[in-house]
Amino acid sequence: MAEPTKSIIVGTAGHIDHGKSALVEALTGTHPDRLEEEKRRGITIDLGFAFLEEDGVRLGFVDVPGHERFVSNMLAGAGGVDLVLLVIAADESIKPQTREHFEICRLLGVKRGLVALTKSDLVDADTAGLVRLEIEDYLRGSFLESAPIIPASARTRTGLPELKTELLRAAREIPNQNAVRHFRLPIDRAFAIKGFGAVVTGTLISGSIAPGEEVELFPGGQRLRVRGLQSGGKSVTQTQAGQRTAVNLAGIEHTALRRGMVLATPGKFRTTRRIDTRLELLRSAPKLKQRARVHFHIGTAETIAEVLFHGLSELAPGQKAFAQLRLQDEVLLLPGDHFIVRQFSPVTTIGGGTVLAPLARRPTMRDTGRVRFLETLERGRPEEILGAMVDRAPVGLGFEEMVARTGWLDDEVRDAATKLNEAQRAKTVSSEPLLLVATRLFEDVRQKIAARVERFHTENPLLPGILREDLRSSVGRRVRAETFRAALEELLAQRKLVAQGEIVKRTGAAISLAPEEARAKEQIEKAFADAGLTVPAVQDVLSKLPVEAKRAEKLLQILLRDKSLVRVAPELIFHQKALAQLRERLSTYKKSKGDRISVPLFKELTGITRKYAIPLLEYLDRERVTRRAGDERVIL
Ligand SMILES: Nc1nc2c(ncn2[C@@H]2O[C@H](COP(=O)(O)OP(=O)(O)O)[C@@H](O)[C@H]2O)c(=O)[nH]1
Ligand SMILES: [Mg+2]
């Protein structure tokens, strides 16, 4: 048989004993109850699975328990459902779990479904008509308002062909899930198969997976290899979003795996215990108080959450609000994921919502931009969302962080970043790896750098500029190196600052000397210029100046930096004119007397003592004016 072109997950929903499991069996030939206890008691306790393949469409059925005690199991199956099969028995009509399951499907964002009016063999036409009216009334204004309501019987098999036709029609109308997303598989079962090892199953809610690939297990972060894959009871070479998936995992015992864990693309995501959400309270629920504790269900995971409203002391029934949830356990979730909350005690479903920020920040009174931020996360375009995140990132937002916080693909992140940058809503301070900072932050760093350079010039009129390294530390350790570098580069490109090697100065900045400093500087230069090659001791020159030692030393530094003076040895400084003359004399010597010169001859030529001659020759060697050859020098 050809591979199906479309895979859809159908979830049952409805009150206990309304015939969900019997209907799944009648449609697929598989009774979904698996457990010994389920068979003995004749009720569904945990999730059951069955498949139906027709006309290139594969329907993966997730059959859920209807008993109110097992709603948490129902919830583990309801995530990832594309199409709900709401089962209502014609002899009982709408009952409590009909309502609860229906609300759960709505809160989880299920968009489509149909209603099976089961056990229609047990009622007459009038009763069936009345129940249909009740159902239509109940569903008015909901996502199932125009869903077909099909009378059926698992016993007499009436209505089954119509049901199948409608299921396939609805399945075809559901847009194909995008398989090119990051892979995520919430685990609903874990067990071992002899000879294979650990196996987990789940509804693939995003992306695709193939044998040989590496996955990351959350929580914990363990990397595992996919040894084999099955879907619908058959080995397959790939599964994608919308398919029931069984994964044989290498490198782990099945006892380390359990419902609620998630397999995902490795190296992208982090679990969390603090999330920002849009929370909706059911009309049927009592009001929800600030700091109330609730049961929290997402994917196949379940934990306890504390609810923190923003500027509200309680949420009224039927209302929605931004709420931060503090989770008792680490959970992997992403923006857009739907969750359900149930009252702490007695346990009933009271609401649900959507994740806006998986890695939320502790709310503070000072944080006045929080509501605007959450509104952007809820409704903004990708670049607006990224921009809002960058604005709230105190040192900028790196690429990995962007992926972890959004769940977007690499290209989507880059695309949003480019748009942001073009709109000048954020500054790209590094493109590989990508790092964005808020425009305001960048401007602040730029100004700090410019101000620091300015202050340096004022405080150090005798120095040409500040060292890059000192400038870096003056903007604070909280500023990342990339941000500093980009801000400095921009100031240099705009010619506001100039860099010379490691020194940065304001454009046009010149050393400004006081009159006595100018005189002292001239005096130093003159002392060396007059001395020729028989130079005085440095300290003798400096001590005779009209300025104090520290300033005298700085003036000397200026002359050395200008290359008016040259330091030949630690205590030996010459005027550059004297050295130029020496080079000339050596080349004249070479022309008339040949290219070799001994130390005594050099002393004679220059008229200096050995104490100066040796360091001077070594200097000339370094400058490649001469080269040592035994006791002599070769003039080059
Ligand atoms: N007469 C009649 N009985 C049914 C029909 N469907 C299911 N039942 C019976 O109703 C009981 C509950 O069915 P089951 O499928 O386990 O209900 P579930 O709890 O919704 O899964 C079982 O005894 C079934 O045999 C039907 O269409 N007609
Ligand atoms: Mg059942």
Image (cartoon, rainbow, N blue to C red):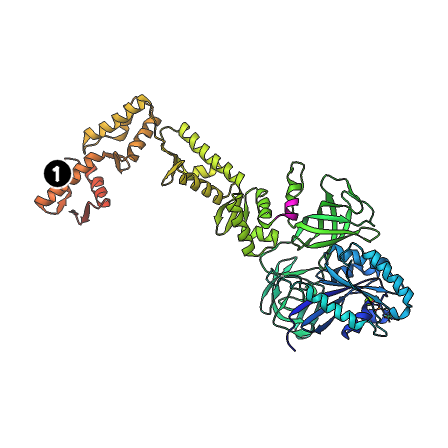
Question: Is residue 472 or residue 71 the one in the foreground?
Answer: 71
Q: In what element is the residue under mark 1? A: helix
Instruction: Give the image location of residue 253, x and y in percent.
Output: 67, 67
Q: What residue type is labelled 1?
A: Leu
**In the figure, 601 relative to 195: above or below?**
above
Q: Is 83 positioned to the left or the right of 498 in the image?
A: right
Q: Residue at x 86, y 58 (%)?
A: 134
Rendered image quadrant of residue 15? bottom right
Residue 562 falls within the magenta-colored stretch: no
Instruction: Give the image location of residue 583, x and y in percent.
Output: 17, 40
**In the figure, 38 relative to 287: above or below?**
below
Rendered image quadrant of residue 137? bottom right
Q: Residue at x 68, y 55 (%)?
A: 337
Question: Is residue 498 or residue 553 the one in the foreground?
Answer: 498
Residue behind mark 1: 605
How many discs appear?
A: 1
- Asked if residue 507 can be seen in this view, the reply is yes
Extreme residue in the bottom direction = 1
Q: Which quarter shows the N terminus?
A: bottom right
- Within 8 Å: ligand 2 and the Cβ of disc 1? no
Rendered image quadrant of residue 408? bottom right
Task: Give the crowd class for mark 1: few <14, some 14-19, many >=20 residues within 10 Å.
Answer: some
Taken as a whole, is the magenta stretch helix, strand or loop?
A: helix
- Asked if residue 94 can be seen in this view, the reply is no
**In the figure, 175 relative to 400: above or below?**
below
Instruction: Give the image location of residue 419, x and y in percent.
Output: 53, 48
**In the figure, 553 relative to 251: above or below?**
above
Q: Which residue is drawn at 84% across and 52% down?
A: 346
Question: Is residue 352 or residue 619 the one in the foreground?
Answer: 352
Q: Please state the quadrant of the image where ligand 2 appears.
A: bottom right
Task: Write the start and end of the magenta stretch as one range.
Answer: 375-380
Instruction: Give the image location of residue 521, x and y in percent.
Output: 28, 26
